[in-house]
């Protein structure tokens, strides 16, 4: 009987934190995929890793790693397509990281576009062109959210297969 309740608790706890991670992806700097991964790791440690568990956890790990870098790639690529220079994109990335650490949760959301705009304004001396680059960055941010959310759903689904197979 105790074993049954431990299983129910472990699965409920894991599912709760996976859902926190999934819906936490709405806040761009929240490490939702990492939270989902940590919940899966917790589940594996508590319930034990079977062969299926190891395989699915490896896939979950790869998805988490890919998902954690996809937002930077998507934002940079869209900004680049909009005409931003690599130096300006780098300035936006650094400002996004510093802003996220200094003023969470929205400092990075303000810092990255602002730094990109200022760097492009200095480079091009045209506000409209600088705003176009910022627009590209924000479109990349939107697409990266969609991709990370889908990755989070897949991670959650893989854990469900692992837990309930």
Image (cartoon, grey):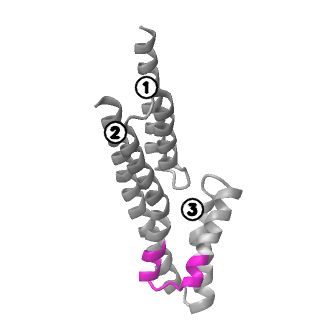
Reply above or below: 109 against 92.
above
Q: Residue furthest top?
A: 1
**Which of pointers 3 and 1 lies earlier in the amino acid sequence?**
1
SS of the residue under disc 2? helix
Residue at the disc numbered 3: 109
**Residue 61, image x, y percentages:** 45, 50
Picture disc at residue 52: 2
Residue at the disc numbered 1: 12
Which residue occupies 36% across, 39% down? Answer: 51
Q: Nearer the viewer, residue 83 or 15?
A: 15
Position of the N terminus by quadrant: top left
**Which of pointers 1 and 2 lies earlier in the amino acid sequence?**
1
Q: Is residue 49 left or right of residue 96?
A: left
**How many other residues sit within 10 Å of disc 1, few (<14), some (14-19) or many (≥20)?**
few
**How many other residues sit within 10 Å of disc 3, few (<14), some (14-19) or many (≥20)?**
many
Q: Which residues are drawn in magenta? A: 76-90
Reply above or below: 79 against 60.
below
- Taking the magenta stretch, the answer to whether it contains residue 162 is no
**Residue 140, image x, y percentages:** 43, 69
SS of the residue under disc 1? helix
């Amino acid at each position: 009987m105790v074993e049954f309740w431990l299983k129910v608790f472990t699965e409920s706890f894991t599912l709760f934190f996976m859902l926190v991670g999934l819906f936490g992806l709405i806040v761009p700097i929240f490490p939702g995929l990492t939270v989902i991964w940590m919940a899966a790791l917790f589940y594996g440690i508590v319930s034990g890793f079977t062969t299926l568990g190891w395989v699915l956890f490896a896939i979950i790990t790869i998805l988490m790693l890919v998902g954690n870098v996809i937002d930077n790639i998507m934002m940079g690529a869209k900004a680049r397509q909009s005409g931003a220079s690599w130096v300006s994109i780098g300035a936006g990335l650094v400002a996004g990281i510093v802003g996220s650490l200094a003023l969470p949760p929205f400092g990075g959301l303000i810092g990255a576009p602002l730094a990109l705009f200022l760097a492009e304004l200095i480079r091009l001396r045209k506000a409209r062109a600088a705003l176009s680059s910022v627009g590209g960055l924000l479109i990349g941010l939107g697409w990266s959210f969609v991709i990370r959310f889908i990755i989070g759903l897949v991670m959650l689904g893989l854990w469900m297969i692992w837990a309930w197979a």
